[in-house]
Image: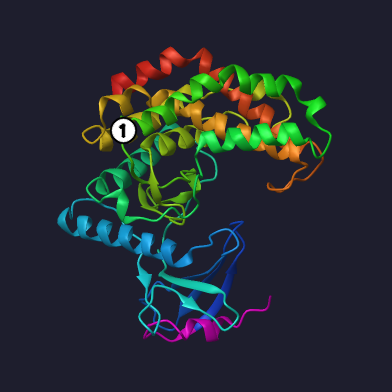
Amino acid sequence: MERNIKEIVSHFNISEECLAFEKNITGHINESYFISTKSADHPGYFLQWINNNIFMNVEGLMDNICAVTGHLASKLVENKELAFKVLEVIRSTDGKNFYRDPDGQYWRLYTFISNAHGYNVVENTEIAYEGGKAFGLFMSLLADLSANRLTDTIPDFHNLEKRLDKFNKSIAQDKANRVKDVASEIEFVKTRTEQMLTIPDLIKAGKLPLRITHNDTKFNNILFDSSDHAMCIVDLDTVMPGSILFDFGDSIRTGANMANEDEKDLTKVDINLPIYEAYTRGFLKNTRSTLNEVEINNLAFSARFMTFIIGLRFLTDFIDGDTYFRTSYPDHNLVRTKVQFRLIEAMERNADRMHEIVMQSI
């Protein structure tokens, strides 16, 4: 779809004259543009089209983001020693936190954060430690904002019981005639299901409190300054009520795997314990005072739990005939499944050490 970016930006409450519009090719869900201005001392703006095929409640999503960024901004004013930044949402000319164009498409505008960079791969323990501190600070600063204030932007996103129900229905239907090819993977799921359901059971029992969580804690959602100090958490579309175990576990799943998510050579798949230890130390440095005993005792296990969920989703999609995740070849989702399950096995072998690291870091 052809976009009239200048016309869209004119519907936001800014005084600077826009100079150029540069499309950002990163990201798979939303569409982004860097907007430069004629003011030499202004960092510019970051415009995004919000994909409401994925995020169906855009108004709720934007209210979530404004509630979180507003709370973070007030906390940073109170704690000026924190060298941290927060996304600034620019209101539209009619006072809303988004603009809806005549085609029904949703747009938002942020002030651009300059002199920042990110990492797709956790290159060393120093970066891992900074990443852990950043997500830990993000969560600790939001600890006194009630999770009930926020809307579920993707309902049941980390709901294992719903994922298992869909998995079992997919096996029964066997639409793509692939069940026969994944007997060992199905058995892997079945032998671990009871253990994995302990997390949902603890949430239902109220022993794992609902907090405001990011729910997409990949390292490329952290911005670093020129000295490689973490300075901002971005991509807040999935910020909603959840367990802190979701965020910690997915950070480890994505950041401490020694192989790529679709690595065909499974001998390369393992848990990078030095990266795990550094991230855990950073994370607990900023969260230890807010976590309860049940959260701490399940922190290491959460890495297996979150890896199990994404492995289950890859396997379900493979059985269904690759209807959700984008694939590059016929067995792509099966390869992804095998990587996740091999990573779980590595975590199982190192379970005692992973828990020990948590206890040493509190």
Residue 296 percent coordinates (x, y): 31, 26
In the figure, is residue 228 to the left or right of 48?
Answer: left
Q: Is residue 347 magenta?
A: no
Quarter-of-image position of residue 133:
top left
Residue 199 vertical placement versus 31 (above, below): above
In the figure, is residue 140 to the left or right of 222?
Answer: left
**Residue for point 65% across, 24% down:** 268
* Quadrant of the frame with the C terminus: top left
Of residues 37 and 312, the one drawn nearer to the viewer in this rendering:
312
**Residue for point 36% across, 16% down:** 356
Residue 200 can be seen, yes or no = yes
* Quadrant of the frame with the N terminus: bottom right
Q: Secondary structure at mark 1?
A: loop
Quarter-of-image position of residue 102:
bottom right
**Residue for point 30% across, 55% down:** 149
**Residue for point 66% across, 31% down:** 168
Residue 261 can be seen, yes or no = no
| Span highlighted in magenta in the image | 1-18
Overall secondary structure of the magenta section: loop
Of residues 245 and 148, the one drawn nearer to the viewer in this rendering:
148
Q: Amino acid at mark 1?
A: Gly
The residue labelled by disc 1 is 206
Of residues 257 and 100, the one drawn nearer to the viewer in this rendering:
100
Residue 257 percent coordinates (x, y): 56, 29
Most extreme residue toward the right is 177
Residue 6 percent coordinates (x, y): 54, 84
Of residues 359 and 212, the one drawn nearer to the viewer in this rendering:
212
For mark 1, does the 10 Å Cα neighbourhood hold few (<14), some (14 to 19), or many (20 or more) residues? Answer: few
Residue 108 vertical placement versus 13 (above, below): above
